[in-house]
Image: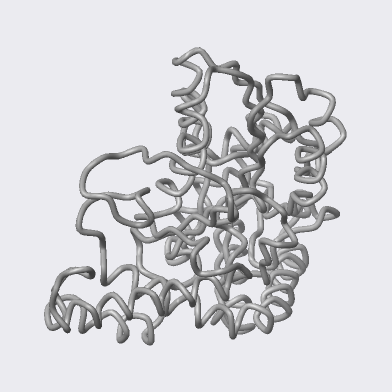
Amino acid sequence: MAPSVLEAMQPYWATHFLLPGQEHPNAQAIGEAMEHAREGLALLAGCDPFEIVFTDGGTSANNLAILGQLQTQQPGHLLVSVLEHESVHAAAAHLGSKGWHIETFPCSVDGVIDPDHVASKMRDDTRLVCLQAANPVLGTIQPVRELADLCHRRGISLHCDATQMFGKLPVDVEQLRADTVSISGHKFYGPKGTGAVYVRRGLQLAPIQYGEPREMGLQSGAGNVPGYIGIGAAASLASRCSGDVADNLTEVRERLIEGLRAVVQPLPIALCEDAPRLPNTVAIEMPGEAKRLQRSARQLVMATARSNDPPDAITRVLRAIGRTDSQIGRTLCISLGWTTSRDQVDRSVEMLAEAWDGLAG
């Protein structure tokens, strides 16, 4: 979490503890601070503040966007990308148990979906299509706008999980043209357990939890006021920085890949290298077992596939682009941050090279 975000949150843990909406001047001030935070998210997303609904994370945002649109409708057809987050697949599976027909559409070996292929699967009873903006494993960026246009010509809504894109690249929901867009605070140096969903003006969602209504009637309960303040502060920070950090992230990402290729043999393979990708995300197949490299270079924070039954997210995504179990077992997933330096990248390359030399020797 960014220090400025923590600083913005501090007064709302104890000093400003009332709930917004209470009949007290201090509570009204808290409500004003929350609206300022909502404005920060709206600026980051490129929408009006009244189109932003606070949630307690990206998972909640995905659930509210999908179930809030469909759970009160008669069962129909739902199309979901194979690359989606577990929360999207799980929400779809819940609808499947209620009589909805859930159909998953594939991606290419480069980790990108074909909008025309998805359009060929649309039916008269298709109600919603789910397509993420960018994949957290591969970094691949999806053609959301093209698919949204195809959906809207058929009277179909599109939900976009954009949690991975905010803070890495500028995002404009008007350009995406999705009907709902998920946001997660900790993806751009905000607090964990905070998020939001953009809801296009005119679109009506139904609440998926019940109690004292808040957040335009779509959320209930007291609400995480410090978290809302925090995600708003993080959004304001990302609005100022995300355009500038993309070039630096791309540079250090390529430095990492080329550095590994210079010192590791056989050559590591950067997955989906020719596709449009996030500037900070690397999925790279190494010559040796990824888990052993991870244990040897234990100072580095990296992700590897964890299990096959049921498959974890990394395994599922890598299988979707045609990787074998052996290749998946050699794949490291690495994320770079705003403050990642060239020296840190070079040191990471050294540690991975040393780990590989130890295994190969």
Q: Is 204 or 114 nearer to us in this picture?
A: 204
Q: Position of residue 237 (x, y in %)?
A: 51, 82
Q: Residue at x 53, y 18 (%)?
A: 74
Question: Which image quadrant is residue 339 in?
Answer: bottom right
Q: Position of residue 256 (x, y in %)?
A: 68, 69
Tell me, what colour scheme is on the image? one colour
Q: Is 226 or 134 nearer to us in this picture?
A: 226
Horizontally, residue 299 falls left or right of residue 173, namely: left
Q: Residue at x 31, y 68 (%)?
A: 227
Q: Residue at x 39, y 54 (%)?
A: 57
* Residue 333, visible in the rendered structure: no
Horizontally, residue 246 falls left or right of residue 201, namely: right
Instruction: Examine the rendered structure and indicate whether residue 126 appears above or below residue 38.
Output: above
Instruction: Examine the rendered structure and indicate whether residue 20 appears above or below residue 155.
Output: below
Q: Residue at x 43, y 58 (%)?
A: 53
Question: Which image quadrant is residue 27 in?
Answer: bottom left
Q: Position of residue 73 (x, y in %)?
A: 51, 24
